[in-house]
Image: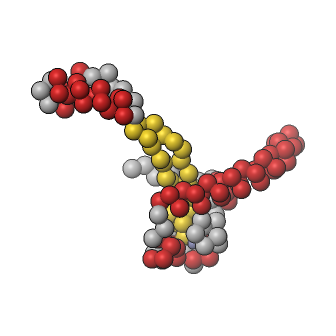
Amino acid sequence: MSARVMREKELRLAAKCLLCRKPFGASGLPVFYRVRIERFAVDMAATRRQSGLEMMLGGHVALAQIMGPDDVMAKGLGAVEFTVCETCSTDLDRARLPIAALEELAQEEADAKSGSIAASDPGDEQEAGKC
Ligand SMILES: [Zn+2]
């Protein structure tokens, strides 16, 4: 696993904990979790085709993987990424939120940020023009 880095602007955008809405530094530790949730839907037709090929080849899954068309078996429905501070990462009440609830909270946060980013984009362009 390669270590990911964040530059100042990305860190600033990731600073707020999704669960307690405080900057991650409020926990007293300069570390945080960056959580990514991806939701996928399985392509049932592709799954049936692959299963059929496996049956035709006598149930040899590995052989079917080599002989098959390597179809797309699942398609992403979207992804969200959010920050969780050290305090919330060990808080059992907050840690028990279902994945779907976390995804919804993160999507609301992303929508709110995209609104504020869109509003600040012209300013960023003006600053870039000054350089
Ligand atoms: Zn928190």
Task: Choose top left, top right, bottom left or bottom right for residue 62.
Answer: top left
Q: Residue furthest left?
A: 58
Residue located at (61% from left, 54% from top):
107
Task: Choose top left, top right, bottom left or bottom right for residue 52.
Answer: top left
Residue located at (12% from left, 27% from top):
58
Quick one: 47 or 121, which is closer to the camera? 47
User: What is the x, y in percent for residue 8?
Assistant: 66, 56
Quick one: 110 or 85, which is closer to the camera? 110
Quick one: 51 or 88, which is closer to the camera? 51
Q: Is residue 11 visible?
A: no
Q: How is the image coloured?
A: secondary structure
User: What is the x, y in percent for residue 122?
Assistant: 84, 44
Residue located at (64% from left, 70% from top):
21
Where ligand 1 lies, by image quadrant?
Answer: bottom right
Residue located at (54% from left, 44% from top):
78
| Residue 115 horizontal side relative to residue 110, left or right | right
User: What is the x, y in percent for residue 6?
Assistant: 58, 53
User: What is the x, y in percent for residue 66?
Assistant: 23, 24
Quarter of the image for the C terminus: give it.
top right
Q: How many marks?
A: 0
Q: Is residue 68 visible?
A: yes
> In the rendered image of this protein, does residue 70 appear above or below residue 93?
above
| Residue 105 horizontal side relative to residue 123, left or right | left
